[in-house]
Image: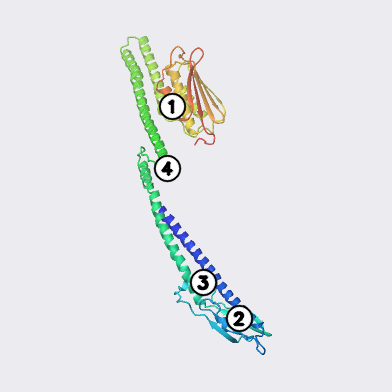
Amino acid sequence: MRLTTYLLSRLVVSGIVILFIAIFWLMYSNHARANQEIVSASTAMMRILEVQAVGFRQGIGLEPRFPDWYPATQVSLPSGACIRLLDASQRTLNSTCHGKVRATPEVPAWFQWLYEYQFGSGEPLTRELTAHGKTYYVEVIPDGDVEVALVWERTQLAIILTTIVVSLLGAVTAWSIHHAISPVASIVAALSELQGGAFDTRLGVYRFTELNQIALACDSLAGSLREEQLKRNALFQRIQTIQEQERRMIALELHDEFGQYLSAINANATALCSAKDVHTAKADAKRIQTNVHRLVILVDELLQKLRPHPSSGANIEEMVRGLLKESAEVRIENFDITLSSNGSFDHIPNEVATTAYRIVQESLTNAKRHASAEHVEVLLHSDENVLKISITDDGSASAQQPIKKGFGIVGMQERAAALGGKTEINFNQGKGLTVHAVLPYSKGTESP
């Protein structure tokens, strides 16, 4: 339903209610007025007859005249009403009627029924009079049709005036409402543009405070949507950049590491084929074996980076233990890993567990390949709403050599920041690095 239609309908209904209240009030007041006229006429007639009943002798041998009906004809009566004098046996002694002063209007059937149903009409007023030891009755009988007609005549004007006022008020109100809410069309159009992705859309200043509040809310929404769009675009670009970096990293590793080892294996194999003695052949075979082993380690590291983390049914402690087990299966001389854990890890959300897994994975790769570490210690600690991770190695890194923030370190920091946490990398006493990660989470959200 349109707002204008709703408001106008409410106005019309209110006008109709007011009109009916006015009609009932006029009916009541006019009925009371008609009754008062009947009472006044009856009272006047009673006083005239009472004076006649107790009248004095006007002369010797003359009795007072009772009833002298002439004064009754001078009593003011409502239009169409009659007055009569009855004896104790209800026999009419005298009567007179007041003719209709003027023609009465035709009364609608619904109005006459409503008036008679509510108040009745034409009901006589009877009063008792005692004179000369006899009982008489004075009765005033109004004309019900005349009473209803007079009430209708007086009510007609109120109905006409009320109808005119309500109509004019409705017209003025309709124009005012239409003028007041005309800016709503521009607001709706702006919201449609926002829905279509035009987040630069802005609304102007409006005359009314409520519309200004809506406009400010729409502008704020548009600004928020625009900001989120920019963030989404930036995130998309970042994802594209990360994908390109991953591909470039894999390509470099395949070119540098694989190429180097494959070239060495090819050279050793060629030398093996032309070896003059067993000792030389064994040495070439040993070198081939070493290079193949290193290739296996490199392939395993690449697979660990590319494969998804373990199934979501495992908690972070089980996931890290599985990662360490896979690293231990690839034989590297003078390299071992230990894991310590403290707290419960069953309630940690899956996205937090995934980030922790990737941080540990990247730290192990850096320690093995770039720092030449011999020992790595992983510590997991969980309290009410924070997961803390520490990966400490005894590699070659030291405070005298600045850390080159490559893709792996930046990736760890960005993963933690996305969850509202942080990742710090500190030098150990002597040599080696420690990666500290703090990942907050909500305990109410369990890992799916």
Query: Which secondary structure lies at badge 2?
Result: strand
Q: Of label 2 and label 3, which has the lower sequence position?
A: 3
Is 346 rendered above or below residue 338? below
Q: Of label 4 and label 1, which has the lower sequence position?
A: 4
- Mark nearest the camera among 4 and 3 is 3
Q: Nearer the viewer, residue 280 or 7?
A: 7
Residue 84: which quarter of the image? bottom right
Q: Residue at horizontal 35%, vertical 26%? A: 244
Q: Residue at horizontal 43%, vertical 26%? A: 414
Q: CA distance from mark 4 to mark 2?
A: 75 Å
Residue 365 can be seen, yes or no = yes
Residue 1 can be seen, yes or no = no
| Contact flag, marks 2 and 3 (Cβ < 8 Å) | no
- Mark nearest the camera among 1 and 2 is 2
Q: Which residue is mark 4?
A: 212
Q: CA distance from mark 3 to mark 1?
A: 85 Å
Q: Nearer the viewer, residue 103 or 151?
A: 103
Q: Which amino acid type is marked by label 1? A: Glu
Q: Which residue is mark 2?
A: 138
Q: CA distance from mark 1 to mark 2?
A: 109 Å
Q: Which amino acid type is marked by label 3? A: Tyr
Q: Position of residue 251 (x, y in %)?
A: 34, 23
| Contact flag, marks 1 and 2 (Cβ < 8 Å) | no
Query: Which secondary structure lies at badge 1?
Result: helix
Q: Which residue is mark 1?
A: 414
- Mark nearest the camera among 4 and 1 is 4
Sort mark 3 into few (<14), some (14-19) or many (20+) by Cα contacts within 10 Å: many
Q: Which residue is mark 3?
A: 115
Q: Which amino acid type is marked by label 2? A: Val
Sort mark 2 into few (<14), some (14-19) or many (20+) by Cα contacts within 10 Å: many
Query: Which secondary structure lies at badge 4?
Result: helix
